[in-house]
Amino acid sequence: MRAQPPGPQLIASNPAFGLDFVACRETHARIVEARDAGAGVLLISEDLDELLELAEQVAVTSDGRNVHEGLAERAVRSEFGRYMASG
C-alpha cells in the first residue's frame, strides 16, 4: 500500500460519463487544475482516451489486481485496450 500524498486529494469515477462536450471539457479542466495545483488525483474510467489525456500513470485492474500499467505518455493504446477488454 502506498502512502497518501500530503494535501488535497480528488477521486473521480467516470467523471465525464453522460456529459455533453462542454461539460466534459469543464470537468476535465477542473481535474487538470486540481492535479496541477498539487492534489493527488485518482481517476477511475473505462474511457482510455480520457485516462491517457488526464493521467500521468495508468493501471488496468481486473479481479482486484493490476494486470497492466505504465506511463500515459508512452502508452500503446492497443495494448492497454486489450487488457481493458479482457478484464
Image (tube, helix red, strand yellow):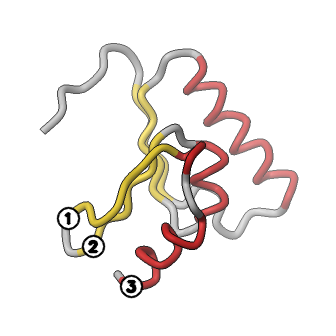
> Percent from the top left, x then y, of residue 13?
47, 56
* Relative vertical location of residue 82 with respect to residue 1 in this rendering, above or below: below
- Secondary structure beneath dot 3 equals helix
Residue 87 in the image: x percent, y percent?
Answer: 34, 81
1 to the left or right of 13: left
Residue drawn at x 18%, y 33% as measured from the top left = 2
Q: Amino acid at mark 2?
A: Ser
* Quadrant including the N terminus: top left
Marks 1 and 3, the one that precedes in the sequence: 1
In this rendering, the count of numbered labels is: 3
- Residue picked out by circle 3: 86
Q: Residue at x 57, y 61 (%)?
A: 76
Residue lying farthest left?
A: 1
Callouts 1 and 2 close, C-beta under 8 Å: yes
Corner quadrant of residue 18: bottom right
* Residue underneath mark 1: 65
